[in-house]
């Protein structure tokens, strides 16, 4: 994508994400209708739907030739990443939105012919926007984020892990490897919003984020941000990310990326690959 075009799409997307965030903040205490999707803990609210609808309408109006891949079904049925595709999670961390009224984000990754061009993650209640344009660095509001530390060893690292994957019966990953990893590192965190966990890796306040079942809208923007500051993002078996399917993901500073996968991650066969 041409730099000038990327810039103008960036400014448009940025103004929409701020506008959508402001609307969520204004309505944060409004009564909520909460429904469940795939299981009783998989929540969705009218705010998730309205926010995605807002982006769908804006994109259709201003960029009718672009596609939208969104969580809540207001986008297009996409089978390939040809052309320009907006990959949108209107509220990432719906459970936090419902229970905590904080620690959730709007996530937008814009890809052109499969290449990540623009990443935006808006921490709505903190009013902090993480943003990146391909080849032009990543920002936290107006502050450029420095390249990630390459020296700090694994035993001084903090990793975001979803503790579900540590129970022995989990279907995705060998429990013993995860136990060894948790013993090795300095500590773990679990924020409940994949997008924010990517943003925190990009910011350098987390050293990595390992997770087993993300959808493209959970990681599309985050992958662009982390790569812009020299981090590495792959599936948990080192394969390239799959932007059209459910996927395992490891996003981290570069030297510990291989170490985590080689020495600690043992995926249960046939279950956790995309
Ligand atoms: C979820 C959050 C959560 C992650 C789940 C996602 P949602 O997204 O990112 O942290 O563990 O896998 O589905 O449903 O709140 O947009
Ligand atoms: Ca959801
Ligand atoms: Ca999500
Ligand atoms: Ca969501």
Image (cartoon, rainbow, N blue to C red):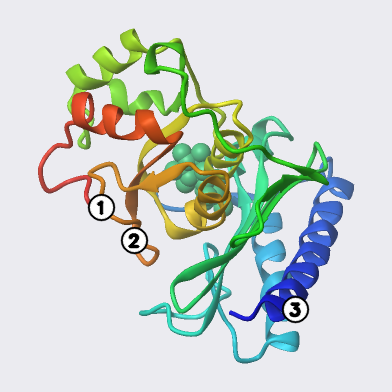
Foreground pick, 261 / 41: 261
Q: What whole-number distance in Å separates the C-alpha atoms at marks 2 and 1?
A: 9 Å
Mark 3 is surrounded, within 10 Å at the Cα level, by few (under 14), some (14 to 19) or many (20 or more) other residues, namely: some
Foreground pick, 128 / 49: 128
Secondary structure beneath disc 3?
A: helix
Marks 3, 2: nearer the viewer: 2
Name above or below for residue 207 compared with residue 69. above
Query: Which label belongs to residue 239?
Result: 1
Secondary structure beneath disc 2?
A: loop
Q: Pointer 2: what residue?
A: 242
Q: What's the residue at 70%, 81% (across, down)?
A: 5
Q: Pointer 3: what residue?
A: 58
Residue 211 image offset from top left, x and y in percent: 37, 37
Which one is earlier in the sequence, the residue at label 3 or at label 2?
3
Marks 2, 1: nearer the viewer: 1
Residue 17 image offset from top left, x and y in percent: 76, 60
Residue 266 image offset from top left, x and y in percent: 17, 31
Q: Are marks 2 and 1 in contact (CB under 8 Å)?
A: yes
């Amino acid at each position: 994508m041409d730099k000038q075009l990327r810039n103008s799409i960036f400014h448009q997307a940025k103004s929409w994400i701020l506008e959508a965030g402001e609307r969520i903040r204004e309505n944060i205490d409004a009564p909520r209708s909460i429904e469940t999707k795939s299981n009783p803990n998989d929540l969705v609210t009218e705010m998730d739907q309205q926010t995605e609808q807002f982006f769908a309408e804006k994109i259709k109006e201003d960029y009718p030739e672009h596609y939208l891949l969104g969580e809540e079904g207001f986008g297009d049925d996409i089978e390939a990443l040809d052309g320009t595709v907006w990959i949108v999670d209107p509220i990432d961390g719906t459970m936090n939105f419902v229970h905590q009224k904080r620690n959730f984000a709007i996530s937008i990754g814009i890809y052109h012919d499969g290449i990540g061009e623009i990443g935006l993650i808006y921490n709505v209640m903190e009013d902090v926007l993480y943003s990146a344009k391909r080849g032009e660095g990543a920002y936290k509001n107006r502050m450029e984020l420095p390249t990630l530390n390459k020296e700090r060893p694994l035993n001084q690292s903090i990793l975001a892990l979803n503790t579900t994957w540590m129970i022995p019966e989990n279907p995705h990953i060998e429990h013993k490897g995860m136990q060894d990893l948790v013993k090795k590192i300095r500590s773990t965190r679990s924020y409940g919003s994949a997008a924010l966990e990517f943003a925190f890796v990009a910011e350098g306040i987390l050293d990595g984020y390992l997770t087993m079942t993300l959808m493209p809208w959970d990681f599309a923007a985050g992958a662009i941000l982390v790569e812009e500051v020299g981090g590495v993002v792959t599936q948990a078996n080192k394969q390239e990310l799959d932007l059209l399917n459910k996927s395992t993901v490891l996003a981290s500073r570069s030297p510990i990326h291989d170490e985590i996968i080689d020495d600690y991650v043992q995926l249960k066969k046939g279950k956790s690959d995309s």
